[in-house]
Amino acid sequence: MRPGMIDAAWLPPEAWRAVGSRRIRVTGSGLLVDTVAGELRRACERFGGEVVRGSGGPPCDLEMSLDGDAGLGAEGYELTGDDTRTVLRAARPHGLLYGMFHLLRSDDAPATGAFRPAVSRRMLDHWDNVDVHPVMGQVERGYAGGSLFWRAGEPRRDLARITAYARLLAACGINAVALNNVNVHATEARLLTDRLGEVAEPAEVFRRYGIRTHLAVSFAAPVLHGLSTADPLDRRVRDWWDGVTADVYAAIPDFGGYVVKADSEGQPGPFTYGRSHADGANLLADVLAPHGGVVHWRAFVYNHRQDWRDRSVDRARAAFDHFTPHDGTFRDNVVLQVKHGPIDFQPREPVSPLIAAMPATRVGAEFQITQEYTGQQRHVCYLAPMWSELLRGEQGPAIAEFAAEFVAVANVGDDPFWTGHPLAQANLYAFGRLAWDPGLEPAAVLDEWAGLTFPRGPRRLYDTLHAIMDGSWRAYEKYTAPLGVGFMVRPGDHYGPDVDGYEYTPWGTYHHADRDGAGVDRTVATGTGCAGLYPKPWSKIYESPDDCPDELALFFHHLPYGHVLQSGSTVIQHIYDTHFAGAREAAEMRERWAGVAGLVPAATHERVRELLDEQVRSAEEWRDQINSYFFRKSGVPDAEGRRIY
Ligand code: GCW
């Protein structure tokens, strides 16, 4: 790729060919309709079609209008037509935008029918810092270069890149972004006040693509701005937030709201003043309500100064224990933002028990597209199969049944491929698509993504992408921490194996391996009781080592190495087998990728090739460390006599 070039990702010019060669009428007016007409006009200039605005005149072969049924809602659209003529109707401008992108991904044979998103907010959280953080850098847990919005303490003002980004997001259905890190440091706290212009500028770009901008704020913002307290029940504090919020809306009329990480990992919160999470969230909800804004209040609250000797404290229970007493007390415009699992974005966790336990609260489920624990965008790890299982409830309560919206931590940066690993683009695309329709098949989403990104490739290319990516999350799971026990990563940067790295630390992420067995006893009968926090039948299923899904066996149970899993294998033999298999699968990915040289752009091929070398190396390191560790603990040899160190 030439210096300064940015990858077109899933919107290369070629993706517009079918639409851009038609005669298109766009009726309606307003900002989003102008965006749609502008996009189509550019496509038509390239591919020979034509855009006409307004009604009247000869019929067109693609008609877009705002006379759709009100039942389509704010973002839905309806497609009708035949081989020669397509009609796209929406009730609101957002529908035309999403309908247009639908036509792109379905190419020349658009499916007919009515389409509406499952949830009204599909949001990305950026963990971008304004200043370069001494430990976390410009983007916390970012693996794709610097921030799109700031560089070394200053706004980048690269509006062309932000525009390209906004189009990509709209094309996969994202309609909200929070620009900055939930760990809000002193400089970033000023984005709310004297640096608000740095938010308003990108917000204007996002607005043109139907995306509302949100901001992560510090609960201590009043104190950081000179007040003596941030007590949510103090009148002066409320007045301060009131005034600041009015200013925000004056600058950004469609501002989405605040995202807050409070009383979590050292971030300030209402506990300082003896107040509850509901007191804190409701204060902000009240000042946002008159403007139509919402608070995303994160439920990632746990004791990160835990004594590892004390087995009664269980991080997997923490969010449940903190928040369920407050169900029904949050304002309507509070979204309780809950990580999908009870611990922290591990490659395998059960669904968080909190998600199904807040019937009187608006719950947003949070996913992590940035691959903090899933290979840091050095490993191929297509996450849609994991999200899909969680959303549909294959091994626990179905997140899609309980969550009113979906949020995910973004994986992009100023890397020319946006995401560091070119194939990690598929995760961003897939999150948007699954948030729109959680029932989509991950392999079908991959088809869409691959068809748009590498248009008109030979069948062999798409088959290879499937062969590499469809099972890549399971391959990653195989060569990392076994059977749902989690962590075993290097403390701090979270990359690569370190089995005991967190075992004697205060973070609450343990595996409890000894000479007889491994895993955390979270049963009601003899453990922390976490299994009992789930609705039936899951509480019963998890409680029993015989019924608990194998993938979660060591998450819920401390099991002897000789325990026979449902697969028929013992715990120890499963560990050996999956680690040999996982590393082998990584090597196979590399071979397969070599076979598609020449079928994708050279720079893409080269970048993925280099990263696959690292993935193979890392997978072997994981395999050997995990296998050696458990062999040394257990003394049980591999039944197949393979090399263990
Ligand atoms: O996964 C952990 C990360 C932290 C992050 C935190 C959170 C933004 O290691 O870097 O902080 O979760 O979600 O708040």
Image (spheres, rainbow, N blue to C red):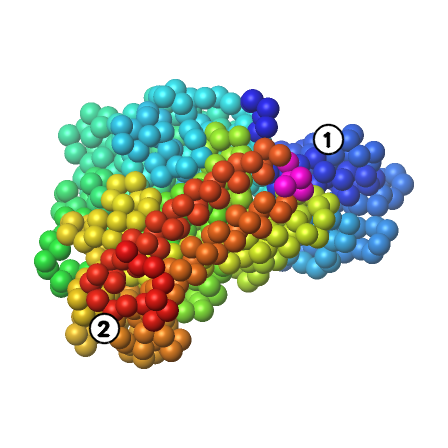
Is residue 5 placed above or below 207 in the rendered structure? above
Q: Which of 489 and 562 is in front in this view?
A: 562
Residue at (59% x, 45% y) in the render: 594
Q: How many numbered discs, if any?
A: 2
Which residue lies most toward the right here? 58
The answer to whether mark 2 is within 8 Å of ligand 1 is no
Q: Mark 1 points at which residue?
A: 42
Mark 2–mark 1 distance (CA, rounded to whole Å)? 64 Å
Q: Nearer the viewer, residue 621 or 286?
A: 621
Depicted 3 relative to depicted 503: above or below: above
Examine the residues drawn in magenta and state their main secondary structure. Answer: loop
Is 123 positioned to the left or the right of 103 in the image? left
Q: What residue type is labelled 1?
A: Arg
Query: Quadrant for ligand 1?
Result: top left
Q: Residue 560 carries which label?
A: 2
Label 1 Cα neighbours within 10 Å, binned few <14 / some 14-19 / many ≥20: some
In front: 636, or 211? 636
Residue 162 position, x and y percent, is: 53, 29
* First to last magenta residue range: 597-601
Is residue 366 shown above or below 356?
Answer: above
- Residue 181 has which mark? none
Quadrant location of the C terminus in the rendered image? bottom left
Q: What element carries label 1?
A: helix
Q: Which residue is drawn at 74% across and 53% down?
A: 110
Q: Which amino acid does label 2 sit on?
A: Pro
Compared to residue 332, the image places residue 46 above or below, namely above
Looking at the image, which residue is at 71% across and 46% down? Answer: 457
- Residue 312 visible, this angle: yes
**Residue 63 % position (x, y):** 78, 45
Residue 357 visible, this angle = no
